[in-house]
Image (spheres, rainbow, N blue to C red):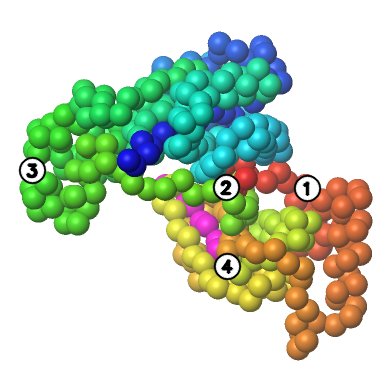
C-alpha cells in the first residue's frame, strides 16, 4: 500500500515587517512598509495593517504613500533578514528529515512516512510553536497531500495560523475559493477564464479538460489538475544559493553614463568580494535596468568561472551598453551573478600576473578585517558601503 503524502508549507508572516517589529515593538499594530522611502522604491513587504489600504508587494512606494500617508516607511536591512532566516532554517533543519527552502521566508516540508511513528500534523504544530517561541516571529503553515494545496491552506490560515486539508478533501476545500488563489495561475489566465464565467475554483473543477486545452494548449491539463488538487511535484532538498544580486534605486532618474558606471563598479566590487569571502565562483553575469515608467529589461551572458572584478567589471559595462537605450533615464539598476559553484579564483595564465593575484589577496584581507569597501577602486569611491538588496538574493 502506497504511503499517503503529508506535505507542509510554511510561510513567515510579513517576514521583513516581523523582523523589524522584533527589534522595535513600537511598530506593532501600525501600518509598516518595507522598501525605500515614500518617494522612491518599490514595496517589498508590508504589514497587514497597511494591506487594509490596498497596499501590496511590488507596488511603487509613491502609490503606497498616497493610499496610506501615515504609514511608516523603512528601508530594510538584508543582514537582519538573512540572520532571521538562518535562525528559522536551522530549527527546521534540526527537526525534519526533508525540506525545501524556496525563498528567504518560505519552506516546504515532506513528512510522508512519518505517520508510522508520529502524527504528522502534531509534528508540524510543534515545529511552528518552536519557531514562534525561539525566534519571536509569527508563522503560518498549511498541510495537505501536495505542494499546491498545502500552499493554498497556508494562505487561508494567515495571519499566524495553521490549517490541515484532509486526504480526499482537496476538491471541497478549493471549490469556494477564487481561481486567483491557485499558485502560479497568472493574472491574464484568470482574466481569460473570467470571460467564460469561471470565477470560483469549483467552476473550474466542473469545466471539461478539453475545453481548457482548447484555450491554453498543453497548459489546460495543468490548470485542470491544479483545480483538482493533483500535484505530484517533489520536495527538492535545501541546497546552497545559486545566485547573488544587488540593486540601486536612484533618487532622481538618470541618463548620466558616468554615474551609472560608477554605481555598477561599486555593486560589482561588492558582489565579487562577497563571492570570494564565501569561496564561490560565478559563471553567468546579468544586468537589470528599470526605466521611469517601471518598464524593466534584463540581459545576461555566460562567462568563464570567476570572482575577479577585473573580469566582471568590463563584462557588466558591456551589458549596460547593449541593454540601455541611452536616450531614456534610468530609475533602477542592478547586477546579478549566478550559476555559482564552490571554488577559489582560477588564475588566467594569459591575462593575470602575480601582482594582480597578490593585490586581490591584500584587498580582501583588509576588507575582511575592517569592513567591505575599506579598499576599493577609485570609480567606486563615490559610493559608500552599500547593503545587499534584501529582496533579490537567494539566502
Position of 205 with respect to 233 (left or right) is left
- Name the residue: 62% across, 32% down: 95
Rounded to the nearest angstrom, the CA distance separating label 1 from label 4 is 26 Å
Rounded to the nearest angstrom, the CA distance separating label 4 from label 3 is 43 Å
Q: Quadrant of the C terminus?
A: top right
Rounded to the nearest angstrom, the CA distance separating label 3 from label 2 is 38 Å
Identify the mark nearer the N-term, 3 or 2.
3
Identify the mark nearer the N-term, 3 or 1.
3
**Residue 185 coordinates in the image, percent (x, y):** 29, 42
Residue that label 4 marks: 284
* Secondary structure type for disc 1: loop
Rounded to the nearest angstrom, the CA distance separating label 2 from label 4 is 22 Å
Q: Nearer the viewer, residue 30 or 176?
A: 176
Residue that label 3 marks: 208
- Name the residue: 19% across, 57% down: 218
Rounded to the nearest angstrom, the CA distance separating label 3 from label 1 is 59 Å
Secondary structure mostly taken by the magenta-highlighted segment of the chain: strand
290 inside magenta stretch: yes
Q: Which residues are magenta?
A: 286-293
Identify the mark nearer the N-term, 2 or 4.
2
Count of marks, rendered view: 4
Residue that label 1 marks: 384
The answer to the question of whether label 3 and label 1 lie on touching residues, with beta carbons closer than 8 A, is no
Q: Nearer the viewer, residue 192 or 166?
A: 166
90 inside magenta stretch: no
Kindly identify which numbered label has been placed on residue 238: 2
Amino acid at each position: 500500500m502506497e504511503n499517503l503524502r503529508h506535505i507542509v508549507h510554511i510561510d513567515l508572516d510579513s517576514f521583513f515587517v516581523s523582523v523589524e517589529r522584533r527589534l522595535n515593538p513600537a511598530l506593532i499594530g501600525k501600518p509598516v512598509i518595507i522598501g525605500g522611502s515614500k518617494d522612491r522604491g518599490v514595496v517589498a513587504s508590508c504589514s497587514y495593517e497597511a494591506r487594509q489600504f490596498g497596499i501590496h508587494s511590488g507596488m511603487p512606494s509613491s502609490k503606497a504613500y498616497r493610499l496610506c500617508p501615515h504609514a511608516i516607511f523603512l528601508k530594510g536591512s538584508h543582514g537582519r533578514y538573512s540572520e532571521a532566516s538562518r535562525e528559522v532554517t536551522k530549527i527546521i533543519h534540526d527537526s525534519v528529515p526533508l525540506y525545501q527552502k524556496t525563498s528567504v521566508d518560505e519552506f516546504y516540508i515532506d513528512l510522508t512516512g512519518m505517520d508510522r511513528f508520529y502524527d504528522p500534523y502534531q509534528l508540524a504544530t510543534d515545529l511552528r510553536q518552536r519557531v514562534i517561541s525561539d525566534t519571536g516571529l509569527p508563522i503560518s503553515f498549511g498541510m495537505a497531500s501536495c505542494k499546491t494545496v498545502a500552499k493554498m491552506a497556508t494562505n487561508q490560515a494567515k495571519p499566524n495560523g495553521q490549517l490541515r486539508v484532509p486526504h480526499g478533501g482537496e476538491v471541497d476545500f478549493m471549490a469556494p475559493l477564487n481561481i486567483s488563489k491557485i499558485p502560479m495561475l497568472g493574472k491574464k489566465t484568470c482574466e481569460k477564464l473570467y470571460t467564460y464565467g469561471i470565477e470560483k475554483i469549483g467552476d473550474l473543477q466542473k469545466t471539461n479538460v478539453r475545453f481548457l486545452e482548447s484555450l491554453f494548449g498543453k497548459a489546460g491539463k495543468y490548470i485542470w489538475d491544479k483545480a483538482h488538487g493533483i500535484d505530484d511535484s517533489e520536495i527538492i532538498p535545501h541546497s546552497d544559493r545559486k545566485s547573488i544580486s544587488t540593486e540601486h534605486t536612484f533618487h532622481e532618474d538618470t541618463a548620466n553614463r558616468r554615474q551609472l558606471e560608477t554605481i555598477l563598479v561599486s555593486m560589482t566590487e561588492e558582489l565579487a568580494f562577497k563571492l570570494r569571502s564565501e569561496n564561490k565562483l560565478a559563471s553567468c553575469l546579468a544586468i537589470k535596468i528599470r526605466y521611469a515608467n517601471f518598464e524593466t529589461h534584463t540581459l545576461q551572458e555566460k562567462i568563464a568561472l570567476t570572482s575577479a572584478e577585473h573580469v566582471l567589471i568590463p563584462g557588466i559595462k558591456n551589458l549596460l551598453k547593449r541593454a540601455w537605450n541611452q536616450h531614456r533615464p534610468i530609475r533602477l539598476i542592478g547586477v546579478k551573478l549566478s550559476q555559482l559553484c564552490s571554488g577559489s579564483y582560477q588564475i588566467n595564465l594569459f591575462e593575470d600576473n602575480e601582482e594582480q593575484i597578490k593585490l586581490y589577496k591584500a584587498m580582501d584581507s583588509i576588507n575582511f578585517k575592517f569592513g567591505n569597501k575599506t579598499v576599493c577602486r577609485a570609480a567606486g569611491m563615490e559610493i559608500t558601503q552599500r547593503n545587499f538588496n534584501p529582496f533579490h538574493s537567494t539566502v
